[in-house]
Image (cartoon, rainbow, N blue to C red):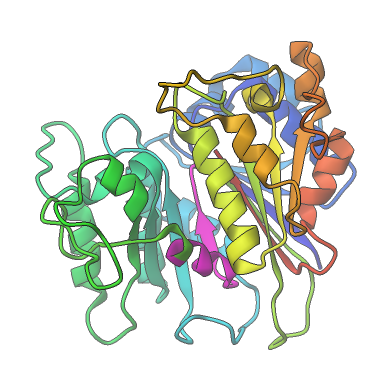
């Protein structure tokens, strides 16, 4: 039996819910989980309710504050394998969270702690992967007055797992951390610690994080999905990756981070990967961007163009998002294919022909 599950904890806008529902229309009935701001919007925003004209399976945390243990239990169950598999990194069932946002401007870190503590209670090994501003969750000197102390929460999680089970993987992207001032001494294979961070966290190359995406275990993010095709227990699981770039090219690091992760997954890990520009992300592949000689800013289109010969990376733009904004892809980016919402639904359900598991992360 095929399954498809979505998780949203960020603000859920009308455009996003519109393409999600349209892409899934007529396919397997997906399960939706809404936490935090997404839960509050789903329950109270008439614009979203008007879109849900058909019956869908939707669960929310009861108060929009991520406190429901049953809610997180249901999320873990929906995102985890339904049978024992033999491909864990150390042979133990795990559950992870890819954290893209800093701890206090966003509630994403609170959601991460909620689900990882519940995973520990379910005898799963909890893992935390920190990327972009998510690396700030590891800062050693956090002193919030009206918020959960995320660094303390990470340390309590590690202590509570004890020595009887395999070690949690608490990994932060070293490039992102170096840019943000965490590297008093350059990070490398022999130096993965920072004097500015809690000692439980290792700062590693992005590839060390991506290799965990090839496992069959559930990994959440602020916006994500996982699809599983029926397979014989104990057989090898083939994982495909969808990275949805939803932000404009500049102003935040989201678009650059999405492209970097997609390219690394395809080129360094042989993962079939779809880099999909959707919502405001289509601005990355429309228009012509030129950087001045003295600019230290990357040119997003040059990066996209450099990946055109990579066989395992497909670069795609959502036609609905293009049409909504009156845009079209740049001719110089001839390898960028436009797809319909129906084709997008196919990729969400199966990212490549050989995939039995398809992960989708929304940037």
Q: Position of residue 30 (x, y in %)?
A: 73, 49
Residue 213: in magenta span: yes
Q: Is residue 252 above or below residue 242?
A: above
Give 167 or 328, whichever is nearer the viewer: 328
Q: Is residue 191 left or right of residue 249?
A: left
Q: Is residue 328 above or below residue 7?
A: above
Which residue occupies 35% across, 50% down?
175
Where residue 236 appears, x then y in whole percent? 70, 83
Q: Indicate the quadrant where residue 255 lies.
A: top right
Which quadrant of the structure image shows residue 283? top right
- Residue 46, position in %: x, y? 63, 16
Res 140 seen here: yes
What residue is shown at x 48% (from left), y 78% (from top)?
93
Looking at the image, the residue that sits furthest to the front is: 293
Left or right: 233 as drawn, with respect to 60: right
Q: Nearer the viewer, residue 191 or 126?
A: 191
Q: Which residues are magenta?
A: 208-223
- Specify the quadrant of the image occupied by residue 146: top left
- Residue 79: x percent and y percent? 59, 61
**Quadrant of the drawing holding the N terminus:** bottom right
Residue located at (46% from left, 42% from top) = 61
Image height check: is 200 above or below 325?
A: below
182 is within the stretch colored magenta = no
State which quarter of the image contains the C terminus: top right
């Amino acid at each position: 039996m095929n399954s498809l599950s979505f998780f949203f904890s960020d603000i859920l806008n009308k455009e996003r819910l519109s393409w999600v529902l349209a892409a899934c229309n007529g396919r397997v009935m997906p399960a939706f989980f809404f936490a935090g701001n997404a839960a509050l919007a789903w329950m109270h925003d008439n614009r979203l309710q008007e879109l849900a004209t058909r019956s869908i399976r939707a669960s929310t945390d009861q108060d929009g504050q991520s406190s429901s243990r049953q809610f997180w239990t249901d999320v873990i169950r929906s995102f985890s394998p339904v049978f024992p598999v033999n491909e864990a990194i150390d042979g133990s069932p795990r559950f992870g969270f890819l954290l893209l946002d800093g701890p206090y401007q966003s509630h994403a870190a609170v959601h991460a702690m909620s689900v990882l503590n519940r995973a520990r209670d379910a005898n799963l090994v909890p893992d935390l992967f920190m990327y972009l501003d998510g690396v700030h969750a590891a800062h050693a000197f956090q002193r919030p007055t009206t918020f959960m102390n995320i660094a303390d929460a990470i340390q309590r999680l590690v202590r509570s797992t004890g020595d009887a089970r395999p070690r949690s993987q608490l990994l932060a992207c070293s490039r992102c951390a170096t840019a943000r001032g965490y590297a008093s001494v350059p990070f490398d294979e022999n130096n993965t610690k920072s004097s500015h961070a809690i000692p439980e966290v290792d700062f590693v190359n992005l590839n060390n994080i991506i290799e965990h995406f090839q496992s069959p275990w559930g990994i959440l993010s602020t916006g994500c999905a996982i699809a599983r095709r029926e397979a014989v227990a104990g057989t090898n699981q083939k994982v495909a990756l969808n990275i949805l770039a939803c932000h404009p090219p500049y102003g935040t690091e989201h678009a650059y981070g999405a492209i970097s992760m997609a390219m690394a997954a395809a080129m360094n890990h042989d993962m079939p990967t779809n880099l999909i520009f959707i919502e405001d992300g289509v601005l990355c592949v429309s228009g012509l961007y030129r950087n001045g000689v003295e600019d230290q800013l990357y040119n997003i289109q040059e990066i996209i163009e450099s990946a055109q010969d990579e066989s395992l990376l497909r670069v795609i733009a959502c036609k609905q998002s293009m049409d909504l904004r009156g845009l079209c892809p740049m001719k110089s980016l001839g390898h960028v294919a436009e797809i319909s919402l129906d084709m997008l639904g196919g990729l969400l359900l199966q990212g490549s022909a050989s995939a039995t598991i398809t992960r989708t992360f929304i940037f």
